[in-house]
Amino acid sequence: MSYILALDQGTTSSRAILFDRDGAIKGVAQREFRQIFPQPGWVEHDPLEIWTSQAGVAVEVLAGAGLRARDVAAIGITNQRETTVVWDRKTGQPIANAIVWQDRRTADTCDRLRTEGAEPLFRERTGLVLDAYFSGTKLAWILDNVPGARARAEAGELAFGTIDSWLLWKLTDGRLHITDGTNASRTLLFNIHTLQWDDELLRALRVPRGVLPAVRNSSEVYGEVTTALGLESVKLAGIAGDQQAALFGQMCTSPGMTKNTYGTGCFMLQNTGTKAPASQHKLLTTVAWMRNGVTEYALEGSVFIGGAVVQWLRDGLGIIRASGEVEALARSVPDNGDVYLVPAFAGLGAPHWDQYARGAIVGLTRGATAAHIARAALESIAFQSADLLDAMQADAGVRLPELRVDGGAARNDFMMQFQSDLIGVPVVRPQITETTALGAAYMAGLAVGFWKSGEEIANQWRTDRRFEPAMPAARVRELRGRWTEALERAKGWQKT
C-alpha cells in the first residue's frame, strides 16, 4: 500500500489526487460540474452530480496510474465548506439541491437574528459572524421551504451534512453519518470551546439535533469504503475542510504561521495554536484541526470571489477562452488604466462583511479594453487578500515574516508578484501547490501510520519560488487607496 488517495471536492470541480510517501503527486483526475443559479444571489449544486463526479475521478485516477484498491493505504477527504445538503436517511436521496456557501438567500434571516440581539451569542460560541455564508441558516431554510421537510427532520427521517458528510455517507452506503471539527465549526451550530453541538444555537435556528452528524477527529480511521467503486475496504481516515487542510498541507503547524489559498475564493488562515482568540478586526475564529486529542485553532479571513472572477471572465464575459489565458492578457497592458473590478458577486466577506454588496467595474473610459478588465480582475484578488492580511496583522499585533500561498491561481506569477508588492512581505509558493489535497492526504496517512509523525511530513515541504516586494511604497498607497474607493461604490448595492 504505497499511496494515499485524496478526494478534493471543490466548488466548481471534484478532483482525486494520489500521493506517494514523499508527498509527491502520482496521479490527478478532475471533473467540473454544473453551477446552478436559480435567481440572483442564489447558488446551488446537485448533490448527486457532486457524488458521481467525485466517485468518477476516484476510479479514473487509479486506472490512470495502473493501481488497484490494495495499493491505497487510506483515503482523506477535503471539501468546499458550508455548502449544505439534506437527504433522506432511508433512500440516500437529497430532498433538494445543495445550497452553496456563496449563496445569499438567508441574508434576511441573519439580519433578523442580529436585530434580535443574537449575534454576540453566535460570535462567542462559534467564532463566526452572523452571515448567510455559513451552513446553519441554509439548513433552516431547507427545513422551512421544502414541503414536509421540517416534520420529517423532527421525526428523524432526514440527515444534514456538509459535503464531507455527504461523501462519507455515499462511500459507506449510509453506515457513516459523521463530520470533523473543521467542518462543524463552520455551521453556526457548533461550540468551538466545548467542541459540541450547542442546544441554544440549535434552538435559535430551529434545527432538530437528530439531523446532525457525529463530530470526529480530523485524523482517525472512521471506517472503510463499501460502495462498489473498486475502492472496497480502503480505510477512510482523514477529513478536513479545504482551508484547514491547506493550512496543514502548507505545514503551518506553529502559532503565527499563515497561508493564503487562491481557489474559487481566497482564504487566509493563521495558526493560533490551542488558543481560540476572538478577532478584533472582523476575522473568524475556527477549528484548525482535531488530532490526537488536541484541538488547534486558526484565525481566518474569507474572500468569497477569488479565482472565480477568472471563471466569470471566461464564462460570463467571454473575453478569454480558457482560464490559463488571463495572465498573458493582463500583462499585455502596462497597468490597469485606473480600472478597478470589485468581484462582490456574492457580497463581501472579511473584513467588510457586507451581504448586500454586489460586483462593480469602475473607472471605465473609451480607452479601456478587455486587457484592462482582465488585469483589474487579477488585481482584485490580490487587493482583497491584502485587506485580509491588514486585519490579521492588526489582530496579531506583529508583522508577518512571510505569506505561504497555494491553490490554482497561486501559479500565476504576475498575481503573486503583485500580491507581494501590495502587502510588503515575501510571498512563498511551495513546489506542490495542491496543498488542500495534500493536507487531507497527510491527515489520512498519519491516522494509518503511512507517515509516522508531523516532523516527517514537515521535511517534505519545499519552496518553488519566493516573490519579494518591489513596488515603491507611494505607488502601493495610491493603488490601495483607489481600490478602497472602488469598494465603497460596490457596498450595499442590493439595498439601494
Image (cartoon, grey):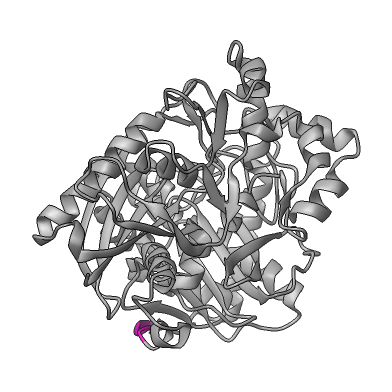
Q: Is residue 397 above or below residue 355?
A: below
Q: Magenta segment: does it hold 218?
A: no
Query: Residue 249: x, y in percent?
Result: 43, 72
Residue 153, position in %: x, y? 63, 23
Q: Residue at x 65, y 69 (%)?
A: 295
The x, y position of residue 135, in whole percent, is: 62, 39
Of the pair 293 and 51, the residue shown nearer to us: 293
Relative horizontal placement of residue 495, taking residue 438 as reference (left or right): right
Q: Is residue 362 visible?
A: no
Q: Is residue 318 above or below residue 261?
A: above
Of residues 38 and 23, which is closer to you in this image? 23
Q: Residue at x 23, y 47 (%)?
A: 57
Q: Residue furthest top?
A: 147
Q: What segment carries the magenta color?
A: 460-465
Q: How many marks?
A: 0
Residue 70 located left or right of residue 219: left
Q: Residue furthest right?
A: 117
Instruction: Indicate whether 98 appears above or below 143.
Output: below
Residue 475 location (% of width, % of height)? 56, 73
Seen in the picture, residue 93 relative to 304 is either above or below; the reply is above
Q: Nearer the viewer, residue 68 or 49?
A: 68
Q: Quadrant of residue 375?
A: bottom left
> Which quadrant of the view contains residue 392?
bottom right
Q: Residue at x 71, y 44 (%)?
A: 188
User: Can residue 93 be seen by looking at this rendering?
Assistant: yes
Q: Quadrant of the C terminus?
A: top right
User: On the rendered image, what quadrant is the N terminus found in?
Assistant: bottom left
